[in-house]
Amino acid sequence: MRTTINISAPILEELKQLQKTEGGSLGNLVSRLLADALARYRTDSIEPDLNWNTKAMQARVDLTDKEAVHALLDGDSL
């Protein structure tokens, strides 16, 4: 399929250099690069990169100490 798009001069020069290196037509190169970019865009927008940080859990109060438990529940101490 033929279409016309405006590409900035620096990008076009880089595409032409890549075309010389890889061979093939400029149209096929641009199509492949755009397909790769669109695939990454779809993947990035669907599957966000999650960083799950964990820490060791420890008791914040001695459950055998009634006064400490009551103080924690009353909001007196954390």
Image (cartoon, grey):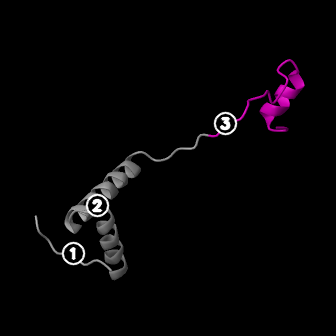
Label 1 belongs to which residue?
5
**Magenta region, main secondary structure:** loop
Instruction: Give the residue at x 87% y 21%.
Output: 66
Q: Is residue 59 above or below residue 15?
A: above
| Position of the N terminus by quadrant | bottom left
Label 3 belongs to which residue?
54
The reply to whether the magenta stretch includes residue 60 is: yes
The reply to whether the magenta stretch includes residue 42 is: no
How much space separates mark 3 and mark 2, taking CA atoms? 38 Å
Callout 3 touching callout 1 (CB < 8 Å): no
Upstream in sequence: badge 1 or badge 2: 1
Q: How many residues crowd around disc 3 within 10 Å: few (fewer than 14), some, or many (20 or more)? A: few
Horizontal and vertical percent for residue 41?
36, 55
- What's under tag 3, amino acid-wise? Thr
| Position of the C terminus by quadrant | top right
For label 3, the SS is: loop
The nearer-to-camera label among 3 and 2 is: 2
Residues in magenta? 53-78
Outermost residue toward the bottom in this view: 9
How much space separates mark 3 and mark 1, taking CA atoms? 48 Å
Horizontal and vertical percent for residue 19?
29, 67
Horizontal and vertical percent for residue 28?
21, 61
Label 2 belongs to which residue?
34
Of residue 44 and residue 7, the one placed in the foreground of this image is: 7
- What's under tag 2, amino acid-wise? Leu
Upstream in sequence: badge 3 or badge 2: 2
